[in-house]
Image (spheres, helix red, strand yellow):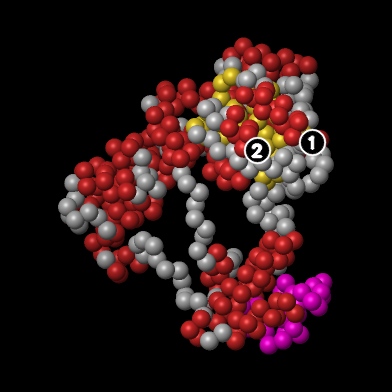
Amino acid sequence: MTDAQETAAETTLHTTGGAPSDDEVPAAGLPIPLLEPREGIPPVVADEDALAEVIAAFAAGTGPVAVDAERASGYRYGQRAYLVQLRREGAGTALVDPVGCPDLSALGDALADTEWILHAATQDLPCLREIGMVPARIFDTELAGRLGGFPRVGLGAMVESVLGYALEKGHSAVDWSTRPLPEPWLRYAALDVELLVDLRDALEKELDRQGKLDWAHQEFDAIASAPPPPPRRDPWRRTSGMHKVRRRRQMAVVREMWTVRDRVAQRRDVSPGKVLGDAAIVEAALALPANVHALTALPGFGHRMGRRQLEQWQAAVDRAKALPDSELPQPGQPLNGPPPPRSWADKDPAAAARLSAARAAVSALAEQLNMPQENLITPDTVRRVCWEPPATVTLTSVADVLESLGARPWQRELVAPLLAAALTARPA
């Protein structure tokens, strides 16, 4: 950062305490490049003594705490955190290594009564929960951007449009399990929480101006209080290219190979895709190779794969081929809810008409409120209400169904009248 840029940044951050006004944004509307944390790059906290100092400093800080986490998606098995970044007034910025300090529950406890600011909270909360950091209150700057009608809600785009600063985002997809972490990565990580408090304050003012602040707080509370999701049923069915696999025997091959791959990936602590690609699994399922020689001829099982690995995958194919018909997977997943909307016109024309009317009404209101439809009410909720409406359609009965499906009070107040009207409308 040049002297002029640093002076401008310091003036904006420390005199306004939030988003810069029009006369503080650089000439021609160009954002100020944010190249260095205000206090420099902090040392990585990787032992208990250093962690104790951070806990004390952040417990003594004031105001909300900005929190971010970096994972190694695509490199390591699972979604564990490999770096946690925090920033709070009076404490500065901390970079904590969960590999060296795997239990951060004491840090989480020290911040238990503090509002946590996260960007896209649902992405980071699961890995933070694994290391003992569970917030009671949050402010999600990405969700705030969606409710506020911002066209782009990535952190870089939000910081630029709201605060007038340009964040360098080139290290978002690197392997954060690397040790030691390179200095440019640490700089990037520290800058991710540098302006979160400022962004939060500016978005709070904007949501209040739009009359949406209470809606946002309801959404944040729902995220913070949501229980961990249950394990996904039949995760092998999400194999990319699965739509090509039609026969039950072929599905069994996908299931068996997916299970072996997941076990190997977990043991080696690598991303499953680095063990064997989805496309290779699907090719083997479609071909049902008779032996290793036939398997080797398929895409994804070339000469670079060792004999032992090839035998492992062929054994998985052979096990699936040997299964009795009674143990083969059934096509499709058991439906938990209404069928796909494309089939409604044939299955239940009245329900299809209700859904069409409801979708149009929700779309119009979302456009009027300047927010994405899915944030006004989830499409799945609309489908469920339209497929199986209450026996007696009233504003209260529709609102009760919405509540049972997890809709927040603000959503019920806005959407229940629309759905009640759609459910009782006469077909044209």
- Frontmost of labels 1 and 2 is 2
Tag shown at residue 184: 1
Residue drawn at (77%, 28%) of the image: 41
Q: Quadrant of the C terminus?
A: bottom left
Say what amino acid the circle numbered 1 marks.
Pro
Vertical placement of residue 276 versus 317, above or below: above
Residue 346 lies in what quarter of the image? bottom left
Asked if residue 414 lies in the magenta stretch, the reply is no
Q: Which residues are magenta?
A: 284-310
Vertical placement of residue 165 versus 422, above or below: above
- What residue is pinned by disc 2? 104
Q: Position of residue 122 (x, y in %)?
A: 53, 43
Residue 154 vs residue 66, the one in the foreground? 66
Say what amino acid the circle numbered 2 marks.
Leu
Residue drawn at (71%, 29%) of the image: 52
Residue 327 vs residue 362, the one in the foreground? 327
Residue drawn at (60%, 77%) of the image: 253
Q: Marks 1/2: CA distance? A: 25 Å
Q: Is residue 320 left or right of residue 210?
A: right
Q: Secondary structure at mark 1?
A: helix
In this view, which residue lies farthest toward the top? 15
